[in-house]
Amino acid sequence: MKILIIQQRRGIGDLIIFLPYIHAISKKFSTRVSLLVKENSKASDLLAEDDHIDEIIILDKEKDGLGGFFKLSNELKKR
């Protein structure tokens, strides 16, 4: 089972506040989770060695808007 957690908040502080919930989801389903975050959350730097996170997917500017939605959808389907 693959689990994708979408962190829609922007900053580092928001990411840290929700980190216990991310860990709880991972523990509940006994699997590592994928995390979809905005680049300015610095998740790649902060959570690179986290045992509960399988991969960090960065939502960049080119995935904004309707066209970006379809690009993101296709990228997630491939994963």
Image (tube, rainbow, N blue to C red):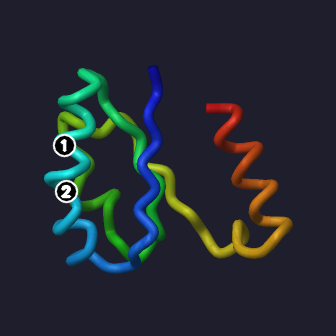
Residue 6 x/y as whole percent: 46, 56
Circle 2: residue type:
Leu
Disc 1 marks which residue?
23
Q: Which residue is mark 2?
A: 19
From the viewer's perspective, is 74 left or right of 5? right
Answer yes or no: do the residues labelled 1 and 2 have beta carbons within 8 Å? yes
Q: Give the residue at x 34% y 57%.
A: 44
Left/right of residue 68 with respect to residue 25 in the rendered view: right
Which amino acid type is shown beneath numbered disc 1?
His
In which image quadrant can residue 17 be found?
Answer: bottom left
- Label 1 SS: helix
Q: Is residue 62 above or below residue 57?
A: below
The crowding category of the residue bearing disc 1, from other C-alpha atoms within 10 Å (few below 14, some 14 to 19, many at least 20), is: some
| Name of the residue lying farthest toward the front | 28
Q: Residue furthest right?
A: 67
Which quarter of the picture shows residue 24?
top left
44 or 4, nearer to the observer? 4
Query: Please, is residue 38 above or below residue 78 in the view?
Result: below
Residue at the image point whose x is 85% and y is 66% from the top: 67
User: What is the x, y in percent for residue 35?
Assistant: 41, 49
Q: Where is residue 28 drawn, in percent x and y?
A: 22, 29
Residue sitting at x 47%, y 69%: 38
**Label ID, residue 3:** none
In the image, residue 69 above or below residue 66: above
Report the quarter where the C terminus lies. top right
